[in-house]
Image: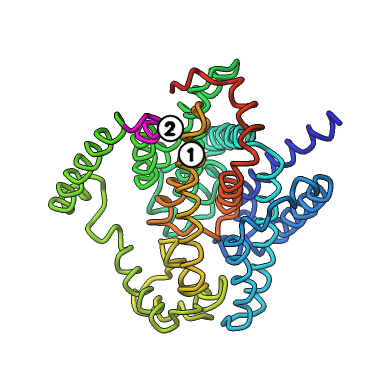
Amino acid sequence: MFMFRLFEKVFVTLSLLILTGAIDLVNERLGFIGTVAAQGSPISRLLEFGILLGTVFLIIAWRKKVFINLHRDALLWLLVGIALASVLWSDNPDLSLRRSISLVGTTLFGVYLAKRYSVNEQLRLLAWTCGIAVLLSIVVAVILPSYGVMGKGSITTAESIAHTGAWRGIYIHKNSLGRMMVLSAVVFRLLAAENYRWRWAAQVGLGLSVALILLSTSKSSLTIFLTILALLPIYKALRWNYTWAIPFFMTVILTGGAFATLFFGNAETILGALGRDITLTGRTDVWAAVIGKIGERPWLGYGYNAFWLGVAGESEDIWTELHWEVPHSHNGFLDLWLDLGLLGAATFALSFILAYLRAIAWIRLTKTAAGLWPLAYLTFLFLANLTESSLLRQKPLWILYIAVTISVNNWSNSLGKSNATEQQFAESGEM
């Protein structure tokens, strides 16, 4: 039994690592450059099939736990069902079918993760994944800079040349490394606040993750990390009694309003200092064009993953309008609307809002830093999708969303077990 449980943890850790895009450099060297090509590479397909088989095996092994109260997560199943049904109206039915089946597989992985492990255990498994990604990224960038640093390799593109010197580690792009390291930094920040014997390792992991965010030169990733770092004390304050909480949050709202007013009144100057322009490096132009295409099919969209197909799809209109090969909307919520229409976007929005409210309730019912993880992750997912597209498209982020949502959705049944584990590492509720 010990070996089986060890196999499970190794499987989860390595699967998450692979799904983050850790093998994209291999795909690039084999000629599969770009997101669409990399997803279709034989190596990626083989590994994802192996992960699916492993997931099905583990679900069967733990079927008594996995299949309990799945009806409580109806919105998640409805969203996946809409993706599958989109084959009926998709511009590319074959592609939508393949991608939606893949979505079912990653959803099952998230269900297994939520049902098999407590929130605290999920966080620790994720820490192993992040730790490996951190170390491998440093090794590749230092020892093999032609692979791990953009613009240094024999395979160069206009994009890589434009970001010469920016670290990308084991990932295909500096922004991918930056986004992964934000997630890593949040995980290690929470674990570093716990009182257990590996606390020092979490502190080292936090420091290295932040260093990689800086070396990636991803300004959006740095902004997201600093925002979450500032929000964590506020989230912790949700545990206070109402006598202290009400004036505190009133102060936070007033302060936030003052900063928002300052930002919008001086947006051009502030963005210029951050190396951005008022269009967010052309993103607002993309959003305007995308909203125009959404208006053509607002209710059901173009089919799951069936819009951004270059000149073979409706994306050709945007390429022609903007005069560059736009890979996606640079906004996860707009891409979801493109794919599944208002029906899919509204279903996800309702699911997210309910998960967010339940994550707040979870915080008030826990006493550890790890109890902040569900709300911290939902915040990360929201912020990361404001300027990038990683909702249903980025498999590990979708898996973690499923795991977090199901975990907090079933907190009434799982809280006793979770607390029994978490209280062993509690630090008197202090971060």
Q: Is residue 392 above or below residue 69?
A: below
Q: Secondary structure at mark 2?
A: helix
- Cα separation, mark 2 vs mark 1, equals 7 Å
Q: Position of residue 335 (x, y in %)?
A: 46, 67
Answer with left or right where residue 331 lies relative to residue 134: left
Residue under circle 1?
181
Asked if the stretch drawn in magenta spans residue 259, the answer is no
Q: Quadrant of residue 10?
A: top right
* Residue 225 is at least partly visible in this image: yes
Q: Is residue 400 above or below residue 326?
A: above
Picture colour scheme: rainbow
Q: Amino acid at mark 2?
A: Val
Q: Position of residue 189 (x, y in %)?
A: 47, 29
Tell me which label, 2 or 1, sits earlier in the chain. 1
Is most of the magenta stretch helix, strand or loop?
A: helix
Nearer to me, 73 or 386 = 73
Residue under circle 2?
210
Residue range highlighted in magenta: 234-242
- Residue most toward the right? 1
Nearer to me, 274 or 196 = 196
